Image (cartoon, coloured by chain):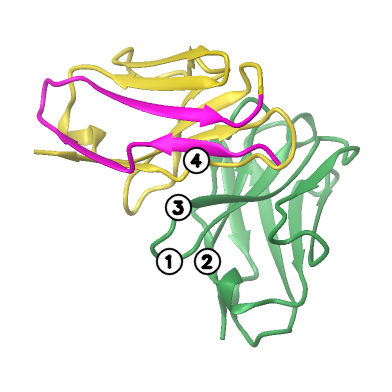
Chain colours: A green, B yellow
Amino acid sequence: EVQLVESGGGLVQPGKSLRLSCRASGFQFDNYAMHWVRQAPGKGLEWVSGIRWNSATIGYADTVQGRFTISRDNAKNFLYLQMNSLRPEDTALYYCAKGTRGLDSWGQGILVTVS
Amino acid sequence: DIQMTQSPSSLSASVGDSVTITCRASQGIEKYLAWYQHTPGKVPKLLIYAASTLQSVVPSRFRGSSSGTHFTLTISNLQPDDVGTYYCQKYDSAPHTFGQGTKLEIK
């Protein structure tokens, strides 16, 4: 069974940093692209960042470009999101998701509050 | 960046009805388009990828189609469990933008 478990969220002051982690299990992690998606309170889904299986291709939403960095450790089956210069508008539930043809598995999400 | 325009923003229908949600890309994305259902309290669920390919275990009542930059999700024989917000998402290249969402209510 595919499992994605996020951690590292919490309350942080504007301008500070936070690092999210996603532990993956139940599938061949290094075969799949991985993504971060967020949902701000009362808003829709927003794709944040994605990384190919071999880290060769990485992309970001314009709203986080230059502030967030995605990475992965295929040996440990972990996905990361380093978030710097956090803003109140980054407050959201952050999901880790797996997939190359659509996002077919999602974690339960981790809450990040910037205030 | 390519914009994804989804409509309507909300709709209400009865059990047994059929509904259609549309998503338009501002530029060509071939068939790199997915549809999701997001029910409150649950994680988003992939319904369709490649514009028209049904994800495993998704009922055949859900159908995706495309014509150029215009994509549609049709749900037939609406069931109470179909309530939720539906999103399209492009995944041809970054950013993998979601549409604004369509909130579906069952009368």
Q: Is residue B26 above or below residue A6?
A: above
Q: Secondary structure at mark 1?
A: loop
Q: Nearer the viewer, mark 4 or mark 1?
A: 4
Instruction: Judge whether A80 appears above or below B2 on screen.
Output: below
| Residue carrying label 4 | B99
Q: Height in image: B73 above or below A54?
A: above
Residue beneath disc 3: A44
Residue under the image location 57 percent in, 21 percent down: B69
The quarter of the image holding the C terminus of chain A is bottom right
Using the image, name the chain to which the residue with label 4 belongs. Answer: B
Label at residue A87: none
Q: Which residue does the numbered mark 1 point to in the structure image? A: A41
Q: CA distance from mark 3 to mark 4?
A: 8 Å
Q: Which residue is mark 2?
A: A92
In the displayed structure image, the side of residue B10 where residue B86 appears, left or right: right
Closer to us: A24 or B104: B104
Ranked by sequence position, the earlier of labels 3 and 2 is 3
